[in-house]
Amino acid sequence: MKKRVSILLPAYNEEASFGLLERSMEKVLENNPNYEWEFLLVNDGSRDNTLQQMIRLHQMDPKHYSYVDLSRNYGKEVAMLAGFDFVTGDATIIMDSDMQHPIDVIPEMLKWWEAGYDDVYAQRKTSKETCFKRRSSQIYYRVLQSLTRIPIQKDTGDFRLLDRSCVEALRKMRESERNTKGMYSWIGFKKKGIWYEQKERMAGETKWSFWSLLNLAVNGIMSYTVAPLRLASILGFVVSLMAFLYLVYIIIKTIVIGEPVQGFPTIMITVLLLGGLILLSLGIIGEYLGKIFNETKGRPVYFINSYNGERKAENKE
Ligand code: UDP
Ligand code: MG
């Protein structure tokens, strides 16, 4: 019996990419006839005709194309979770709907999967991103790795093949502020990196602004590790120690040579520095507290309008 492989394609306002997507999936079918294919499209609350395109593909070829229509735009991370809930393959390949991920890598992924690897992730060889984006992501990975003992994969995105076991593990992780990249590492399993050349976006435009990337970066650190909290404590400890030494110094100095008032700069500097550190520490604690707040509500991570047009489809839990 043929093994079943799903391609998971989250899409947000990607109507312009669907021509390319359709042609690419056709090629996948043609080039890999030894597998049974499923193309699962997840509409992440698009405001253009992405959903209509999905319905069209599903009606044209219901055997291969399925779609999940989310009730609003939840972001790619949640869209992928919805995908994990609905895929039916023995393995799942995650790809961007704008087809920046080349389909030529798929046979190699399948090869390593057959060889027993559970998570075959693709690493970007050259990146056409701006120098600033590349440098900052490099530094970011280095900082992140120094904060945690979970191994972090560099230059790796969501483009990867996951065995059913990985997909099932990821399904069980139902936090609503998701950092899927961290989760791939966290769940473990047998991993294998392969290389690919990222393509340029052919149609539509990128959904990531500077702020959303910064948000992703901060979330990334905070969902990996509580090291910033530790940093706040260490900083607090060091500063208190210095303050204590300074205090002893002042007392002795006052006793020995007396203290004419003066000292305005010293006081200002101390007050400002301490105030800043206290606010910083409070901020760090607050960020984590906010995360706890969001998770304790225990809401379902997403709602769907329909699965393959079935309005009654239950939300998977
Ligand atoms: N995406 C999504 N929901 C969002 C934003 C993006 O499902 O809120 C999808 C998008 O349709 C694409 C993938 O995530 O398939 C990657 O997005 P994009 O190409 O904009 O990111 P980039 O390649 O520029 O990093
Ligand atoms: Mg893209």
Image (cartoon, grey):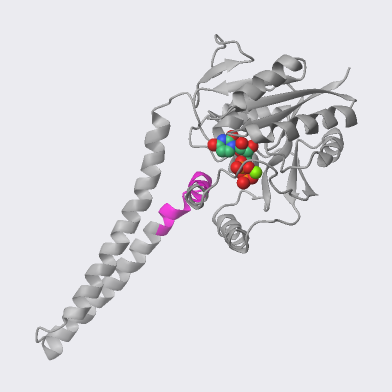
**Which quadrant would residue 61 be assigned to in this image?**
top right
Dominant secondary structure of the residues highlighted in magenta in the image: helix
Q: Which residues are magenta?
A: 216-231
Nearer to us in this view, 208 or 218? 208
**Apparent side of residue 71 relative to residue 120 in the rendered image (left or right):** left
> Which picture quadrant has residue 235?
bottom left
- Residue 4: percent from left, percent from top: 80, 22
| Observer able to see residue 150 | yes
Where is residue 8 shown, x and y percent of the image? Answer: 69, 30
Q: Where is 5 relative to 188, above or below?
A: above
Q: Position of residue 284 (x, y in %)?
A: 38, 52
Residue drawn at x 79%, y 31% as measured from the top left: 23
Quadrant of ligand 1: it is: top right
Instruction: Please say if 251 is above or below 160.
Output: below
**x 60%, y 60%: residue:** 142
Q: Is residue 270 magenta?
A: no
Q: Kindly tell me whether residue 186 is visible in this rendering.
A: no
